[in-house]
Amino acid sequence: MEETRHELTVVLGEEDRLDSYIASKLGLSRTRSQKLVASGCVLVDGRPAKKSELVVADSCVAVRVPAPVVVGIEAEDIPLEIIFQDEVLVVVNKPPGMVVHPGPGHHSGTMVNALMHHVRDLSGVGGRLRPGIVHRLDQDTSGLLVVAKNDAAHLALSDALRRRKVKRLYQTAVWGHISESPITIEAPIGRDPKDRKRMSVNEDGRPALTRVKLRERWERADLLDVALKTGRTHQIRVHLTHIGHPVVGDPVYGVGWERGMGGPTRSWAVKLSNRVPRQFLHAAELTFDHPLSGERLRFQAPLPADLAKAAAWARGDEG
């Protein structure tokens, strides 16, 4: 991607903060626009722009947008299932066990490292270590993710997420049987005050909304369709634990839950637990409007082999 230059003439009635004006005209994020101003890439009537200044009618705003550069991340030839790609976005079916982007303890082997190899025109939007990343999945959660290739797509997709215009449907297996279907869980989520590495439902948390629908009823567990309306950390796992039905195989919120069962169902639950190699959570469907064309796009990914095999046993399809 090459550096781009823009000449904008402010018309009557468009008075606004300069960074907001640039963001709206060029489809950039407010943060990116502020950085352009601060780095001297914006001129107003031929002079360097001032921070937080207002644009006025007949002003000429010249903007130089350097090509985004991803630094500090090595491309790695890691297998990655790309199910859709065009000039502005990529949709990936992330395998379980893969971290989305580099961070403490995970400097290589991430989805971003793989993307750097497979997607040659990936831009640096979204941050130095998470280029193009619009939303994330836990390391042990498999399924669909959308990645933006430029600022405009990143801004549009992030905004659609905030406005709840992106449909994210998960499949998960939980211990026990939900009492009704569908269920709406609306409870704030924040850091657990007793353990900062965990999340919990607490009054100081951020609003969170999850919708749950029964898909299959097994002997001592349910397979659910779960729709995320907000995107809090560990939201599905925390909300389902909150209503007494932790995710099967969850190493944080559901450890040992099956061992607390009594009677003949305990043996079945232990056998299921032994067949589930990770948390039973998969991002199965992703629907959103294309940021360029506006076309409604819908992608689906079936349960991966590890979870599909466990589900087949649970419903009695195999021994």
Image (cartoon, rainbow, N blue to C red):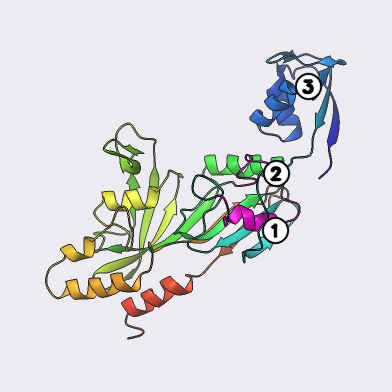
168 vs 95, nearest the viewer = 95
How many numbered tags mark residues here?
A: 3
Tell me which segment is drawn in magenta: 107-133
Characterize the local packing of mark 3: few (<14), some (14-19) or many (20 or more) Cα atoms within 10 angstroms: some
| Circle 3 residue | 40
Identity of the amino acid at label 3? Gly
User: Residue 117 bears which disc, if any?
Assistant: 1
Which residue sits at x=23%, y=61%?
256
Q: Is residue 293 left or right of residue 103?
A: right
137 vs 156, nearest the viewer = 137
- Look at the image and tell me whether residue 219 can be seen: no
Name the spot of residue 23 as percent of width and height, x first: 70, 29
As drawn, 100 above or below 304: above
Q: Is residue 73 left or right of residue 255?
A: right
Between discs 2 and 3, the one toward the N terminus:
3
Residue 179 inside the magenta-drawn segment: no
Place residue 214 in its image quadrant: bottom left
Q: Secondary structure at mark 3?
A: loop
Between discs 1 and 3, the one toward the N terminus:
3
As drawn, 20 above or below 259: above
Identity of the amino acid at label 2? Val
**Chief SS of the magenta region:** loop
Assign the C terminus to one quadrant of the image. bottom left
Q: Secondary structure at mark 2?
A: loop
Q: Secondary structure at mark 1?
A: helix
Assign the N terminus to one quadrant of the image. top right
User: Residue 70 bears which disc, if any?
Assistant: 2
How far is disc 2 from disc 1 in space, using C-alphas? Answer: 12 Å
Which residue sits at x=71%, y=30%?
24
Name the spot of residue 63 as percent of width and height, x first: 81, 27
